[in-house]
């Protein structure tokens, strides 16, 4: 009798464990906010602030109104970041596009209109012949794609820009809306596109901490945020 009771008890405990595990995964899913986990939002923004202190502007805007205007929900880590930093430039390398600025250089909506037109013409003409045997830039061995490997929003799963170079369009930074994570896609006007399987704030942190290289190395003196003030 005792062995039967033991087996029954073990079976019961196993069933309870499965229920608890299932509840954990449901709870984990509830904590997801705009395709990323809440804990990641907090963690990477905190890490960015440790590298480059924020001006703590506490910018006020209506996320629901912006999402409705775009017809899609932008990630909460993006909203949380721009609410703290506002419009401006990180490390003189990347301007963050924001939905509440009327300045073209920082306006998400204005930049999207122009960038979408540029994209429609195709970006399959590179400034360098990447097939040249004498051209040995190591980045070409790490996933850069030429042409138009992605669609552009409002195409389903298309790109949406969130950042750009402060001088010209050397780099443009996008979300790839075709996957749940909204991974980052970088466009280099010399080499094409490269995708990074990480969220926007995770990418920004890794870029600023020199864990991702785009032909640049940030020194302590260059790690500044310059806010843009509307005139």
Image: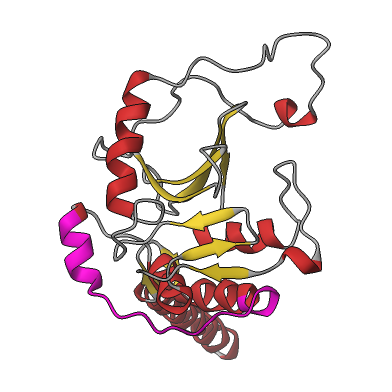
Q: Is residue 58 rendered magenta in the image? A: yes
Q: How many marks?
A: 0
Against 83, residue 68 (above or below) is above
Please tell me which residue lies in front, 152 or 230: 230
Please tell me which residue lies in front, 25 or 41: 41
In percent of width and height, residue 48 lies at 62, 72
- Residue at the location (75% across, 47% down)? 216
Image-based side of 31 in relation to 42, left or right: left
In percent of width and height, residue 17 lies at 49, 80
Q: Which residues are magenta?
A: 49-69
In percent of width and height, residue 120 lies at 32, 24
- Residue at the location (61% across, 17% down)? 127
In percent of width and height, residue 143 lies at 64, 30
Image-based side of 60 in relation to 223, left or right: left
- Outermost top residue: 132
Q: Is residue 208 rendered magenta in the image? A: no
Please tell me which residue lies in front, 222 or 26: 222
Please tell me which residue lies in front, 37 or 190: 190
Q: Please state, as top left, top right, bottom left or bottom right, where the C terminus lies in the image.
A: bottom left
Q: For residue 32, which quarter of the picture?
A: bottom left
Image-based side of 155 in relation to 204, left or right: left
Against 139, residue 159 (above or below) is below
Image-based side of 27 in relation to 209, left or right: left
- Residue at the location (66% across, 69% down)? 224
Q: Please state, as top left, top right, bottom left or bottom right, where the N terminus lies in the image.
A: bottom right
- Residue at the location (45% across, 45% down)? 174
Tell me how the rendering is colored: secondary structure
Q: For residue 205, which quarter of the picture?
A: bottom right
């Amino acid at each position: 009798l005792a062995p039967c009771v033991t087996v029954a008890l073990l079976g019961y405990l196993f069933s309870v464990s499965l229920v608890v595990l299932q509840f954990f995964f449901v709870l984990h899913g509830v904590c997801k906010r705009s395709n990323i986990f809440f804990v990641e939002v907090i963690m990477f923004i905190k890490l960015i602030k440790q590298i480059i202190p924020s001006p703590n502007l506490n910018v006020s805007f209506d996320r629901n109104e912006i999402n409705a205007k775009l017809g899609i929900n932008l990630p909460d880590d993006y909203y949380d970041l721009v609410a703290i930093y506002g419009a401006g430039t990180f490390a003189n390398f990347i301007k963050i596009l924001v939905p509440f600025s009327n300045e073209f250089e920082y306006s998400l909506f204005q930049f999207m209109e122009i960038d979408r037109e540029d994209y429609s013409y195709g970006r399959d003409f590179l400034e360098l012949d990447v097939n040249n045997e004498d051209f040995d830039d190591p980045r070409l061995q790490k996933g850069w794609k030429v042409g138009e490997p992605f669609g552009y929003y409002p195409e389903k799963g298309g790109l949406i820009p969130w950042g750009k170079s402060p001088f010209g369009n050397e780099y443009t930074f996008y979300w790839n809306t075709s996957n749940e994570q909204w991974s980052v896609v970088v466009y280099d006007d010399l080499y094409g596109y490269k995708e990074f399987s990480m969220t926007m704030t995770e990418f920004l942190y890794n870029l600023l901490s020199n864990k991702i290289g785009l032909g640049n190395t940030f020194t302590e003196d260059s790690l500044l945020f310059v806010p843009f003030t509307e005139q």
